Image (spheres, helix red, strand yellow):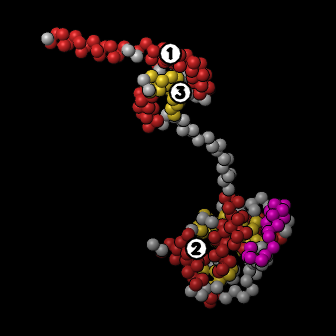
Amino acid sequence: MSYKHSLRQTYWQRQKHTSFAPTRHYDFRQEWEANFGNAIAQANKLKEQGYLVEEGMQKGALTENQAQRIAKRLQSAGWDVQLIPIATWAGERVVFVVFKPPKEQEAPAPTTPQPGKPKKSDAEKLYERYFKTFWGPGSDPPDLQEFANKGYLVDPSMYVALITPTSQSQDSLVTMLRNEQAKGQPLTAFDNTPKLRTATTKNKSMGSQFVVLDSQGKIGVRIRYFSAALRVLGKGKVTVYSPGADMPIYLVRDDGHAIAIAPPTDLDVTKAVTVDSLVMQSQQQT
């Protein structure tokens, strides 16, 4: 009984399966052949756009459900997926799958290094400090051409001048300095340090109006100009020259740049501090 039952059940199952198979296959083949050319053309067009299209791709056709599962995984990784329908099998579309890898992050275009600004020389920095310190708002701009030609420049107040080491001018302001340098007998010399400038500013705020530069108390400068000149000259050794009382005072740094300061007409030693005292005060600072 069981044998006959089993035989009959298998027969009916096979009969049910094969009853539509020949026509279904025929219809599928007809639809496949009708759409295949267009599908390949569409795939090749996508290939030109960067999609990956395998050779002999017709062997890799998938049902739409299978294709969607693959597409989902690829899309989650950034791939672009296209499904190209070809035919229908058992109510479900059969498709080709083509895909394009994610765009690579475009590397930023290499920036062309901009040529750095040339570093300013110590002399150029000194000139800038001189202009900034002694050319107040509203003053005519410094005549740089005159400065270049003569090698010296007097500020608008006609009280302070800057002289370059190479100045060949025959102006008395320059020739007096060259003569004193040739004698080799400076009034004094000191190190222009931040502490010295601090001591000078402190004495100025305490009421000192002048700085005396010689041992007789006859040659001096207004402390405000002395303080400003130290800032312009910057750190380093400063040598002081002067032809005498009521004559210009020259503060010369090691590279030869000099600040010439006009003498005060009302020098009062009772309202003055000596340069030696300023140096001593600076050395006592902690």
**CA gap, disc 3 and disc 2:** 85 Å
Check disc 1 and give the amino acid type.
Arg
Give the foreground label among 1 and 3: 1
Frontmost residue, 278 versus 13:
13
**CA gap, disc 1 and disc 3:** 17 Å
Would you call the spot at circle 3 few (<14 residues within 10 Å), some (14-19), or many (20 or more)? Answer: some
The residue indicated by pointer 1 is: 29
Residue 84 - label: 3
Which numbered disc, 1 or 2, marks the residue that appears first in the sequence?
A: 1
Q: Is residue 151 magenta?
A: yes
Instruction: Answer whether labels 1 and 2 touch (C-beta < 8 Å).
Output: no
Instruction: Answer whether labels 3 and 2 touch (C-beta < 8 Å).
Output: no
Which numbered disc, 3 or 2, marks the residue that appears first in the sequence?
A: 3
Frontmost residue, 160 versus 111:
111
For the record, the magenta segment spans 135-153
Which numbered disc, 1 or 3, marks the residue that appears first in the sequence?
A: 1
Disc tally is 3
Label 2: element kind: helix
Check disc 2 and give the amino acid type.
Arg
The residue indicated by pointer 2 is: 197
Mark yes or no: residue 211 visible: yes
